[in-house]
Image (tube, rainbow, N blue to C red):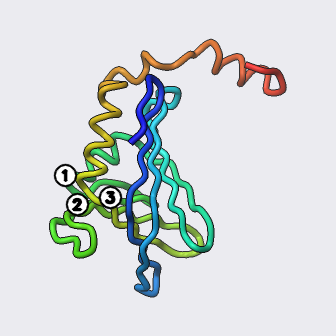
Amino acid sequence: MTIDKECVTTTLPARIADDNGVTRQVTATICYETTEPWAVTLTFHTARGRTTTTIGRELLAEGLAHMAGAQDAWIWPDGSGEAIGRAVFLCLKGPGGQTIYQLPLSDVDAFLHRCQSLVPAGTEGDHLDLDTELAALLNPGSPA
């Protein structure tokens, strides 16, 4: 796990299952940046390329304890993950179907604890530079 004052990144083993029930081992990279304090980016590295999605940090944390989510993203824990021990599942639905990812619950939990050490829950707004964000919205072509 890589940690600096603005970012937490970890790479961990994962499994992926498609609509047909075909599963395979992949690698996942999870990244948290204080510049986007409510979000976590997950990148899954497969033989076909990379798939990246961004979900809420709070949603990921809730999914470690119980099923959480809405519409196209669901997360839930399972205590009997065969290949990688206790697991957390992430189901992403899109126009092409759905994909279920299985991640080691203990690794995701450790990642979230590191995120909390950088930005405690409830203080996310303190880490935004609203002047820079507003300037970027009002002047889309200029450097921030």
**Residue at the farthest top position:** 131
Residue tagged 2: 77
Residue tagged 3: 75
Tell me the element at label 1.
helix
Tell me the element at label 2.
strand
Percent coordinates x, y for residue 40 in the rendering:
45, 43
Q: Taking 43 as reference, is 25 left or right?
A: left
Q: Residue at x 26, y 46 (%)?
A: 109
Q: Nearer the viewer, residue 57 or 6?
A: 6
Mark 3: amino acid:
Ile
Mark positioned earlier in the residue sequence (3 or 1):
1
Percent coordinates x, y for residue 83 in the rendering:
27, 74
**Residue at the farthest front position:** 2
Q: Nearer the viewer, residue 105 or 96?
A: 105
Query: What is the crowding at mark 1: few (fewer than 14 residues within 10 Å), some, or many (at least 20)?
Result: some
| Tag 3 near tag 1, CB within 8 Å | no
The image shows residue 140, relative to residue 91, as above or below, that is above
Mark 1: amino acid:
Ala
Q: Quadrant of residue 124?
A: top left
Q: Residue at x 52, y 53 (%)?
A: 53
Quadrant of the frame with the N terminus: top left
Q: Residue at x 41, y 32 (%)?
A: 3
Q: Quadrant of residue 5?
A: top left
Q: Nearer the viewer, residue 23 or 84?
A: 84
- In the picture, the disc for residue 65 is 1
Mark 2: amino acid:
Pro
| Tag 1 near tag 2, CB within 8 Å | yes
Quadrant of the frame with the C terminus: top right
Query: What is the crowding at mark 2: few (fewer than 14 residues within 10 Å), some, or many (at least 20)?
Result: many
Tell me the element at label 3.
strand
